[in-house]
Amino acid sequence: MTSRMGDAGHISVPTVRTDPSQGALTFVYLYGWPIYAYALFEIPEFDDRYWLWPWYDMYGNNFANVSSLQGFKPGKYLLRYTEDNFGVHLASEQDEYRAYVNSPTPYGMLLNRMLVKHWTSEDLSIVHSQQGRMLFTPKARGAGPHKGIPPLDLQIFLNLADSLDIGQTILSLTALLSRYNPPEVVSDRAWIAVALEKAGISSDGTFTQPEGTDLSLDVARANTLAATSRNVSGLSESLCNSWT
């Protein structure tokens, strides 16, 4: 297993505000892409500032959060791919981990956040020091649902980047990723598998365009549907100052 971690250490908001109508809180972000969901992550001792480890599955769904607001403590946590019971599950006091983070997909992403209290070099130094003590360590694969699933090969994104047909690219990428990454809602998996098959996506990770279909037209329809759905009543809530 391998993983990718990066430091988005530049901060674009020069002031700290707590009222959403006035702006946003200032954070330092640490982002990562766990290529295989079976890893140890260790949260260091923090001061009283806000911190968050949010976990996202392959499709961008936030399935688990470990944060100071929830009362989680520093220590070791285990991220693992499971077939059900997704989210954070506290461990017993005798366990070597504080909790287990069960992921619905073997591939996923995290986007750590830490509050910047003051816009000073001293406070930023403290934050960056804490970032350096955040550990994410891949663990050897054992028995379980992840057995036989290969690490994510980032080359597939580059291989598909040369395609001039956006529809073909999206569906080919979906075929490659959906093969090992089922939907989070277990009861939806059967009908989604049928829908993908009808769309030309095979369980072997390949896409074949069904006869009589027009991908360019389908892409246009999908974009129109996405744009109009934003205006559906109740879908979003205004927080003022152009925030929703």
Image (cartoon, rainbow, N blue to C red):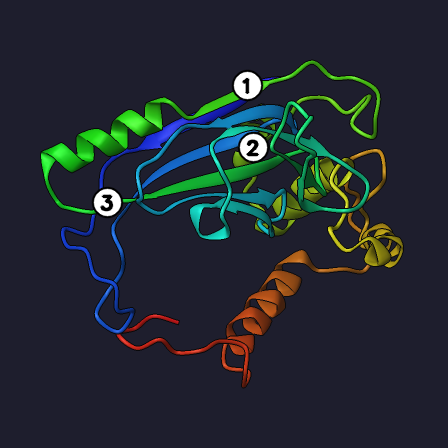
* Of 143 and 209, the residue lying toward us: 143
Q: Quadrant of the C terminus?
A: bottom left
- Name the residue tied to disc 2: 157
How far apart are the two marked residues, 1 and 2, measured between alpha carbons? 24 Å
Residue carrying label 3: 116
Disc on the earlier residue, 3 or 1? 3
Horizontal arrangement in the rendering, residue 240 relative to residue 32 (left or right): left
Q: Residue at x 84, y 53 (%)?
A: 189
Choose mark 1 or mark 2, whichever is in front.
Answer: 1
Q: Is residue 125 left or right of residue 201?
A: left
Q: Is residue 157 above or below residue 209?
A: above
Q: Amino acid at mark 1?
A: Thr
Secondary element at tag 2: helix
Badge 3 vs badge 1, beta-carbon distance below 8 Å: no
* Residue tagged 1: 137
Dots 3 and 2: beta carbons under 8 Å? no
Distance from Cα at disc 3 to Cα at disc 2: 34 Å
Rendering coords of residue 112 (x, y %)? 42, 40
